[in-house]
Image (tube, helix red, strand yellow):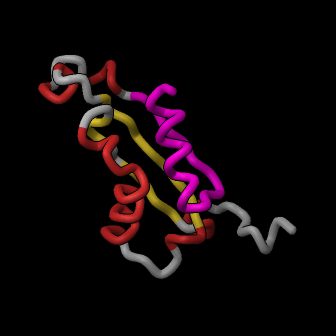
């Protein structure tokens, strides 16, 4: 399974409304982390689970879900972790 697919699979634990992952590894080809095999990915994730949580708490939730991928296959994961309202997306209740 490639890294993006594995990221999406693990992030399902946060019951996301949407996930967007961009592989930016080619932009960091000479970076020391890239030489060691870790990729650079940019994440935007929208979830109800982020409601009431601050930015640091949201990032912890994502890193907890991603787990050991951050120790090898991923070197950098800048992210936007948003509630549906922050992203302008309908909530599950609104889409019914």
Q: Residue at x 60, y 57 (%)?
A: 16
Q: Along the horizontal axis of the image, is 9 left or right of 58? A: right
Asked if the magenta segment contains residue 31, the reply would be no
Residue 5 position in % (x across, y down): 54, 34
Relative to 20, is 60 above or below? below
Locate the C terminus by quadrant. bottom right
Give the vertical position of 4 relative to 77 (above or below): above
Residue at the spot 49% in from the left edge and 33% down from the top edge: 4
Residue 48 image point, x, y percent: 59, 70
Report the front residue among 41 and 68: 68
In the current view of this chain or complex, which residue is farthest to the left? 32
Among the 4 quarters of the image, the one containing residue 43? top left
Taking the view exactly as shown, the residue that stands out farthest to the right is 96
**In the rendered structure, does residue 2 fall within the stretch colored magenta?**
yes
Q: Toward the viewer: 91 or 37?
A: 37
Place of residue 9 in the rendered image (x, y in percent of width and height, measured from the top left): 55, 44
Give the side of residue 87 with respect to residue 68, left or right.
right
Q: Which portion, as a residue range, is magenta? A: 1-23
Q: Quadrant of residue 32?
A: top left
Q: Residue at x 31, y 36 (%)?
A: 74
Vertical relation: 51 (above or below) 8: below
Q: Give the vertical position of 13 relative to 96 (above or below).
A: above
In the visual, does 86 lie left or right of 3? Answer: right
Residue 66: image x %, image y %? 40, 49
The residue positioned 73% from the left and 65% from the top of the image is 90
């Amino acid at each position: 399974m490639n890294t993006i697919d594995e990221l999406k699979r693990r992030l399902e634990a946060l019951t996301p409304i949407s996930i967007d992952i961009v592989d930016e590894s080619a932009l960091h080809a000479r970076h020391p982390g890239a030489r060691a095999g870790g990729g650079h990915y940019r994440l935007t994730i929208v979830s109800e689970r982020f409601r009431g949580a601050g930015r640091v708490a949201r990032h912890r939730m994502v890193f907890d879900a991603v787990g050991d991928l951050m120790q090898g296959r991923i070197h950098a994961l800048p992210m936007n972790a948003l509630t549906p309202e922050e992203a302008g997306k309908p909530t599950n209740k609104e889409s019914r």
